[in-house]
Amino acid sequence: MQTTTLGKNGPTVTALGIGTWAWGDQLFWNYGNSYDKNQVREAYLAAINAGITFFDTAEVYGLGESESLIGQFMKEDGRSVDIATKFGPVPWRFSADSVYEAVTASLKRLQLSRVTLYQVHWPFSFFLSQETLMNALADEVEKGRIGAIGVSNYSAQQMREAHQFLAKRGIPLAVNQVQYSLLSRQIERNGVLATARELGVTILAYSPLAQGLLTGKYSPQSGNSPDGARRFSGAFSTKGLENIAPLLQVLQELATKYQKTPAQIALNWLVAQETIPIPGAKNARQAIDNAGALGWALSVEDAAQLSAMSESLI
């Protein structure tokens, strides 16, 4: 199984993770209706059986249910995995104590004494300054409760500031988790990707399959429509799907060439950009499909073709 490090000298994790926003989330993903705890458990086990042992969650996912489910699954299964979770800098959190309390609550739900990666979910500074926040996170590293510090949705400048605050404590910024896919390449243009590479910060790519658009499941001809809040997105409308049809066609052609699925091609393209994609998986089939993105590589020419095609659409 391919592995990579978080940051320059951080923890080693599998080169692809599983995002668990959908585990317990009823509002956006319709958890409890189109899929349930049993299918999510099967996704967890299928991922580990396929060699994927890195799971990304957050305290806000399902209002803590995602963390609780993972905690249950880990206890039932017993195998070692790497967990990344997140802190939400909401307005009523205004002191370093709130970081300690949030880490404690997440660890309790996860039934762990330590997580591999702890990330700041958004770059909001209401009453808790970035300097205070980063120092509080550094304290947690020194206590041994988190292995590495990350941020999420940070701009290039915000990432640089967080890096500088942590450097004063002798602790590297390991991760910036941002939206990145063949249909969302803003980080290539706004300086985030270049700054991450300069600072040695690993990019975790969320929504790497554009919430399912790059799987090939949805097309103007298929008649398929997503459930949950996605059904209201213009991206899944007939017009939206027609706009990306040329890219979906190239994905399918490459899938045939490599004997892979379109999703595996799209994920492998992200691996080629030296990022860690964290696609979701609501069942075992999706988890196994995600794992199939590793262990092989697109040719330079084919990766470049995908880059050019997606660039023409966005």
Image: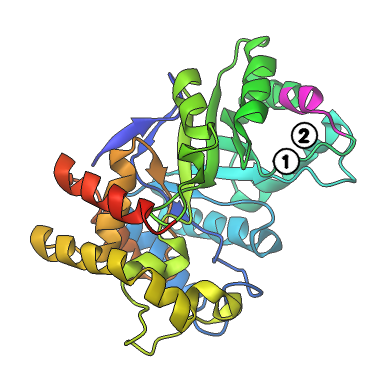
Helix, strand or loop at mark 1: helix
**What residue appears at the point 66 percent right and 65 percent down from the top-left corner?**
62
Q: Quadrant of residue 264?
A: bottom left
Residue 197, position as x, y percentages in the image: 44, 24
Q: Please state which of residues 161 and 47 is positioned toward the viewer in this rendering.
A: 161
Mark 1 is surrounded, within 10 Å at the Cα level, by few (under 14), some (14 to 19) or many (20 or more) other residues, namely: some
Instruction: Please state which amino acid type lies under the numbered disc 2.
Output: Tyr
Distance between the Cα atoms at labels 2 and 1?
6 Å
Q: Quadrant of residue 273?
A: top left
Is the Cβ of the residue at disc 2 closer than 8 Å to that at disc 1? yes
**What residue appears at the point 40 percent right and 60 percent down from the top-left corner?**
209
For residue 112, above or below residue 159: below
For residue 177, above or below residue 259: above
Q: Please state which of residues 250 and 154 is positioned toward the viewer in this rendering.
A: 250
For residue 236, above or below residue 253: below
Q: Which mark is residue 193?
A: none
Instruction: Please state which amino acid type lies under the numbered disc 1.
Output: Thr
Residue behind mark 1: 104
Report the magenta stretch's main SS: helix
Q: Is residue 143 visible?
A: no
Helix, strand or loop at mark 2: helix
Quarter in which the N terminus is drawn: top left
Q: Is residue 127 left or right of residue 111?
A: right
Asked if residue 81 is among those painted magenta in the image, a careful observer would answer no
Point out the stretch of residues depicted in magenta: 128-134
Q: Quadrant of residue 103?
A: top right
